[in-house]
Image (cartoon, rainbow, N blue to C red):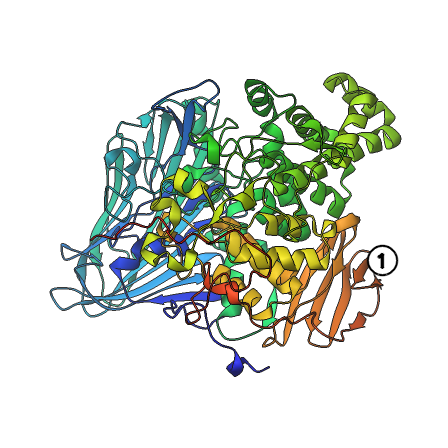
Amino acid sequence: MSHESFDGPVTELRRDFGDDPWRLVSRGIDPALAGQDESIFALANGYLGMRGNYEEGLPLGSHGTFLNGLHETWRIQHAENAYGFAEHGQTIVNVPDTKTIRIYVDDERLNLQSSEILDIHRVLDLREGTLTRTLLWLTPTGKRVRVETRRMVSFASRHLATIEMRVTVLDADAEVTVSSLIVNRQDLGRVHTEGPADTFDPRQTNQFTERILDPGPAVHSGDRSVLSFRVRDSRMTLGVGVDHHFDSGTDDEWRHRIDKSHDRVRHVYQGTARAGRTVQIVKTSAYHHSATAALSEMLDRCIHSLNSAAAEPRDVRWERQREYLAAFWDRSDVRVDAEPGVQQAIRWNLFQVAQASARADGRGIPAKGLTGSGYSGHYFWDTEIYVLPFLTYTSPFWARNALRARQRMLPQARVRAAMLNENGALFPWRTINGEEASAYYAAGTAGYHINADITYALARYVAATGDLEYVLSGASDVAIETARLWASLGFWRRGADGVECFHIHGVTGPDEYTTVVNDNLFTNVMARFNLRFAVEVARRIAAEAPEEYGVLADRLNLTPEEIDAWERAADGMAVPYSEDHGIHPQDAHFLEREVWDLAATPPEQKPLLLHFHPLVIYRFQVLKQADVVLAMLLASDEFDEEQKRRNFDYYDALTTGDSTLSAVVQSIVAAEVGYRDLAYRYFEHALRVDLDDLHHNAADGLHIASTGGVWMALVQGFAGMRDAGRQLSFDPRLPDHWGSLEFRLEWRGQRFEVRLERERMIFTLLEGEKPVVVRVRDSDVRIAPGAPVEVVMADQGPNLGAFAGLSAGILPRDGDEDPMANLTVEVPVVTTAIPTRPVTG
């Protein structure tokens, strides 16, 4: 099918970033889009992140510079406290800002909101890893001034960022002032977030009313300033340093002074700019933080970083950035023959995963990366399920680093499990420092599946890499301690049929609109996986590394009897299934509830969590995000084709898509069961969720799980890749209007390329001497050094045609379709009294 025959995009109002597949270009200034653009054009490396604020400060959504893991703690004030409730919240700190550089020409300040700007455009270059901007300003005295900036947060040197600014007065000489600032915006003024002040949105960050950063010693010398701070309650320490290199373009003398206080430092350069000659300032910033180091140590580390940067030519840092990203794209790029704009959007999403994870270096990956303060900078299960697949198969060492972050949290997870009267470890639902920070336990702490999600990601990493050394170095403890939690939490019960099953009660699955339930299918299926993997790990170490097993068994008091008990619990796990309906209920009592009439719910009442009390939502069959459908993806080999289709038919019409975690999963499973058009529409929604601000909160930061999910939708959805049974398999579903899909994977140290076309798949081994065996539908394919291997494709899987249920969730409604029309099973009555309330204002 040609591109012209495609029905078109999900959204009618699409942002225009040009058609360059490697660069996003924004032209003009729209203050209403400032917050969104600051997230879209943010630069980060996994350790340090800078929002895409204009150097001049305005227009503004919210200022932001963040360091992964640097946070403040605060006591959670429960209206009615109870034993075991989370006691302390954690919120990422907005560290002192070094992005701001102000320009004055003939004592007139360049202000992008009020000055006469003749032309302006910004470019995010995905290969260069830079944000550049060019503007032409007509001053009140009629002089034209060209201002060019180039910004980078370094991947090669994770503590460093660089901003270059070039100012050229085109028509005549002029008096120019360049004022470069370091500003502690966290304490000089509350961070502004868009929207009415009384808006409640749990997706946003907590706001502080008291001082957070207590100033420490500072050093000012020449063109350099280095400051230190201590975070008031968490006691973490922070250093920020700035070097300046100023070049007037002439031999004229320019004056330099430093205005300094604890929270604001200005390096001011003043002089005469000659017509046509460029004045340039290069601003190098260094950031360090620590949970234990002294303030003086923070100063020393920043000074060391700045000295190292100054010791080499400045062009080197830009070249290293290009080289780092060239290597990333070489192993990670996904190329498509698709309609205009898709390739650019795909690469932008993959770039965001790199920016969130590349130099996290053993820290977690926040839900918003380092692009904003949304979700308070917390780490969720998003990382393990949506981000780590991409890292595991393209940059496995990055995946290992992310897993190490969870391993370091194991001591706190053990304490948390004991507090909840369980054995083993219970990882926190949301956290920065390893302690539970979720104040609402029903949709937070009760999500015990976080344990299995972490172990699932660990198992996937080990299968893909064969990294037994990592397992022996302590990762085995994660698998074992999480298995202990399930063995402790669950219990045996004999059913009416006389069969004993292992049940897990009082938990919340991925769907946060259904909480504290019994035998949530996703939780039970994933717990079974967790238990079986722990058994496999323990027995494998015992067989292949008996000495290490002895040490492990002594350290954890592990016995063969306990391992056998895990195996029995896994084999006896209760997995809900309704013979009457022919589907898997989401939990033991899910089908007893009324069905929420999504078609009768006006857009003004969505997302539901912002308009209905949780108890109202919990009484209905309505989903925030995929739950059973996600289980069918992660445990794909445990459901047959008919079960997948019937489950998908049932649950898709109930899913609101209020979570950005949902669209990619629905896309993948829709593609698998044969709803081709629906799969593509869900994919497109995920692809544009932040670029078009489809959930209306991109200003708070990007949705990193969704950006990682885009890779999943491409590789696991359209290319049909699965990894069940420790073997890669492919059952492709190339979109009808695409010509090809091409990507690279790493498996057991071998790297190979996959090219999917309409009538064939081509596999090419790129690195490594050992053959890789994959399965394509019903045949094994051996990818060996030498010539590529080609597999002829008879088709692109089943095609079930249109899907009526697409009007129920996040996608546009098609006419007056009944959202329940796709439900081919007998269902409880759809409520006729949806509890909506009048919309005012």
Which residue lies under the disc numbered 1? 771
Q: Nearer the viewer, residue 553 or 646?
A: 646
Q: Look at the picture and state if 189 lies above or below 108.
A: above
Could you tell me which residue is drawn at 87 percent across and 32 percent down?
544
Q: Position of residue 303 (x, y in %)?
A: 43, 34
Q: Nearer the viewer, residue 364 or 765?
A: 364
Q: Quadrant of residue 374?
A: top left
Disc 1 is placed on an element classified as: loop
Q: Look at the picture and state if 567 lies above or below 741.
A: above
Query: Where's the N terminus, which quadrant?
Result: bottom right
How many labels, in total? 1
Question: Is residue 582 left or right of 70 when viewed as pictured?
Answer: right
Q: Position of residue 469 (x, y in %)?
A: 76, 35
Q: Position of residue 426 (x, y in %)?
A: 59, 27
Q: Quadrant of residue 459?
A: top right
Residue furthest out toward the left: 141
